[in-house]
Amino acid sequence: MRTIADQRVGRRPQSPRLPVPALARLPRVRIGRPALLWWGWAAALFLLYATVSARRQALVRTTGYDLGIFEQAVRAYAHLRAPVAPLRGDGFNLLGDHFHPVLALLAPLYRLVPSPYTLLVAQAALLALAVVPLARQAARVLGRRPAHVVACGYGLSWGIASAVGFDFHEVCFAVPLVSYALEALARHNWRRALAHAAPLLLVKEDLGLTLAAIGAYIAWRGPRRLGIAATALGLVGSALEFKVLMPYFSPAGTYAHAANLAPAHHALLTTLALAPLDAVRPEVKATTLVLVFAPAALIALRSPLALIALPTLGWRMLSTNAFHWGTAFHYTAVLMPVVFAALTDALRPYAADGGPLARRHVRASLATVAAVTLVLVPSFPLAQVAHRSTWHGTPHVRAVHALLRRIPDGATVAASNRLVPQLTSRTTVALFPTFPVHWKLYATDGPIPRPTAQWIAYDRVPPESWPHPPGPWPYPGPRQEQEYARALAGYGYVRVAEADGVSLLRRRD
């Protein structure tokens, strides 16, 4: 009620003062502007990633390995079928290649928009989403301005850029999960961290080891029983996927990539003793290990959160597959949230100190992070947005699109690697000349296996054929190419059209 004195002078009534403990118990009102800033970063990064990915698809720079394979799996899910990918082999269930049932989440979107762009846009959104918890935690610990440096460092980091610059991969689901789990760990919200990390088992078989690492961190810094349970869940989950689930779905009855995990030495003790050396040789491995933490100016190594990167780095450096050792492809994307969460954690004591030297150290560290980010950007795919070639098609690209439009929807096609993603949404595509084939005729039909597709589309520009075909194509000279053309003619294929190195053939009925 207003007092008589208040009424006389026209003053507004004042709320009664609460004691300090009562004020402490009141819920804090969240200010909307900082949240909008972090979501603004996510929106900006989404547009950047989506633009790079979409232009690569439009310019025929994507590949059947891997965008085409994943689109075939998602397309099958969208029609309530098992994720069989003809690009991996006749009747090959992709859950026998890698265990990623999380891809089924894209099925409703793909049913609405059946296009490879659906996968690329979804990947862009997931990778951009991971910046929100990283920036939010940096703002709590370091302040708003440093949080922008962390957001920029993550968003332009080479690990994310390499993932955006090479097709679509299931690991894009893991990146925001790890990012949110790390924010919860930094805030000692152990159960929330586990809730975000547990779905990693549905993203890829090796990410159970990352879950185990998060569990070990919880056991060390938080409730021991919960941490041990999370560690056991991660280890047992990955073991079941490697030993039971993937062999069950694989047509061969074994884990498809078991050769990559073969020990480097015959004797177990020798393998264990030399593992530290094998992890840094050849030289490309040591370079990658340094570059992983370079976006955070190596400061992240001072935080125990950096240990969560060990499982991914371990299997990559000890793999026998040389593609796992370098900086290309998607293998480093899941490590970038770890690097920048560890950076924030490493700078936390200096920000809390508040002294002049401590503040200077934080500013110098973040300035170094920003400088390293700017130096590395031109060497990785995000810089493609500034290239003129990204925004202008070529006669070769126009020839590809013109010829592929002549293939009717629903047809079966054997296409070369870079033509596959242009066709997977509307035809059944296999890789040319490896699949589909009559396997019994492989050894007797001449220089190539007998195709069974209605159409064949192959491109001699660009010449790279990784990872398939491993055999006779492309030939180094015109003589071999003529032999190849005669073989296809003998199998009943007629050349329908050809332009700028792209050939389109149709099988006679």
Image (tube, helix red, strand yellow):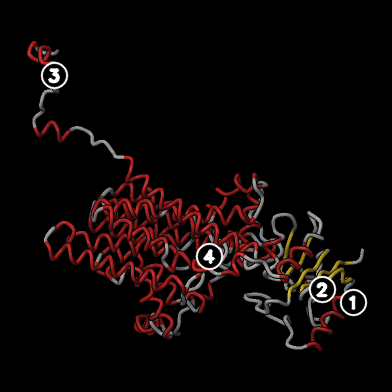
Let me know if residue 252 appears in the view.
no
- Judge the density around disc 2: few (<14), some (14-19), many (≥20) Cα neighbours within 10 Å: many
Q: Secondary structure at mark 2?
A: loop
User: What's the CA distance linking mark 1 and mark 3?
Assistant: 100 Å
Residue lying at 38% horizontally and 58% vertically, measured from the top left: 211
Residue 470 in the image: x percent, y percent?
67, 79
User: What's the CA distance linking mark 3 and mark 2?
Assistant: 94 Å
Q: Earlier in the sequence, mark 4 or mark 2?
A: 4
Q: What residue does disc 4 label?
A: 385
Q: Secondary structure at mark 4?
A: helix
Q: What residue does disc 2 label?
A: 450
- Looking at the image, is mark 4 or mark 2 nearer the viewer? 4
Q: Does 291 sit above or below residue 105?
A: below
Residue 360 in the image: x percent, y percent?
18, 65
Mark 1: amino acid: Gly
- Looking at the image, is mark 3 or mark 2 nearer the viewer? 3
Seen in the image, is 15 located left or right of residue 75? left
Q: What residue does disc 1 label?
A: 490
Residue 311 in the image: x percent, y percent?
38, 67
Let me know if residue 335 appears in the view.
yes
Q: What residue does disc 3 label?
A: 11
Q: Earlier in the sequence, mark 3 or mark 2?
A: 3
Mark 2: amino acid: Arg
User: What's the CA distance linking mark 4 and mark 1?
Assistant: 45 Å
Seen in the image, is 415 located left or right of residue 486? left
- Looking at the image, is mark 4 or mark 1 nearer the viewer? 4
Could you tell me which quadrant the C terminus lies in? bottom right
Seen in the image, is 160 located left or right of residue 274? right
- Looking at the image, is mark 3 or mark 4 nearer the viewer? 3
